Image (tube, rainbow, N blue to C red):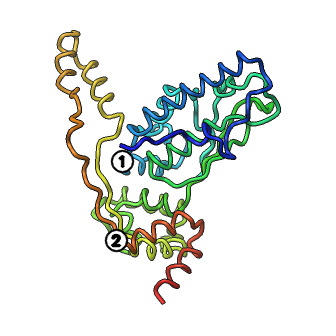
Amino acid sequence: MADPGLPPFMTNSAGGPPPAMDGSFGQSMGAFGALLKLQQNISDKFPKAKVPWNETRKFLKASTIELIRGTSLYKFHMKFFKDIGLGNMQLISYAPMHYIFAVPNNPVCNFYPALQNQKVCVATTDALHRFFREDLELECSVEETECIKNGDPVCKFKVDLQPISAYQVMLDEYDKKILSGIRPPVDDTELRERVRTLTIYKLLDSGRLSEIGNAYMQFANNMPVQEKVFDPPWKLQEELSSIADSHSTFGGAFGEMAKKIQVPDNSSPAAPKPPVSEETAKLQEEAKKTDSFAELLSKMKKEQQ
């Protein structure tokens, strides 16, 4: 695997963090050491945190903060960031494809003890962007809207998902059948719930395909994707916890846990990615650069002429 290199906040790019030159030499060295440790944690753990679409789908379809917090992905995300060293993050506001996270007592602010009256948490902003984009495969923009170092009570971060990317991950085959006017093999309760979710995301309007829904279906038909199926990164931990709870003795639990834990065979070649046509690859790149369906469809029509 190629070295991912330093994240943006550790480089000399324009988006780097504020310099900590106003403090003492010891404070500056302490901040540098803390950033190095954080960068190492990110480099080590992010590549192992990829989440399958079926789990991200549950997160995207959850329509209230309480339901979102109940998903396995959300719980993993919060613990993952805490273990890395990014503090006790929590979701405090939600609208479809828009999330606001808060971090009270943000440890990243401690990297810059001498700085005041400015936002300094570029490390957290970068980590959120990388988690959503690389581990969840959701194109997004991330912005720090409030910062403790800027006089705010907590640090807040706004994550806005790109609609095309969110729809691609969120919609399964049954959802696409509904959008195509075909009833999937589900009971009435599940059908109503799916229709409600598609309506919340503005793909349906009064039970009919909306303009946005029609535009997306045209896009999806021109860019088929193959969903990759694999275990979520938290599965093993959940299995071990379940084993521990089900055994009354340490010996019994340890024996069963040992069967679950296997050393990965690094000599095995990675599973090949499904082939992508040149046309599909071009559409994928255009989708990443396009914020509206109208603009994307205009580009698609020009290509077909």
The N terminus, quarter of image: top left
Tell me whether circle 2 and circle 1 mark residues in contact (CB < 8 Å). no
Mark 1 falls on what kind of element? loop
Outermost residue to the bottom: 305
- In the image, is residue 213 above or below residue 65? below
Drawn side of residue 68 relative to residue 192, left or right: right
Q: Helix or strand or loop: what does disc 2 sit on?
A: loop
Q: Is 107 situated above or below 173?
A: above
First reached walking from the N terminus: tag 2 or tag 1: 1
Q: Is residue 26 above or below residue 179?
A: above
**Mark 1, residues whose alpha carbon is within 10 Å: few (<14), some, or many (≥20)?**
many
Say how many tags the image has: 2
Q: Position of residue 274 (x, y in %)?
A: 28, 61
Image x and y of residue 288, in percent:
52, 63
Q: Is residue 193 visible?
A: no
Relative to the observer, which residue lies in front, 17 or 132? 17
Give the residue number, with chain letter if any, for mark 2. 277
Q: Residue at x 36, y 56 (%)?
A: 190
Across and down, in percent, residue 239 comes to: 27, 29
Residue behind mark 1: 52
Residue drawn at x 38%, y 51% is: 53
Q: Nearer the viewer, mark 2 or mark 1?
A: 2
User: Residue 114, can we see it?
Assistant: yes
Q: Amino acid at mark 2?
A: Ser
Type of the residue with mark 1:
Pro
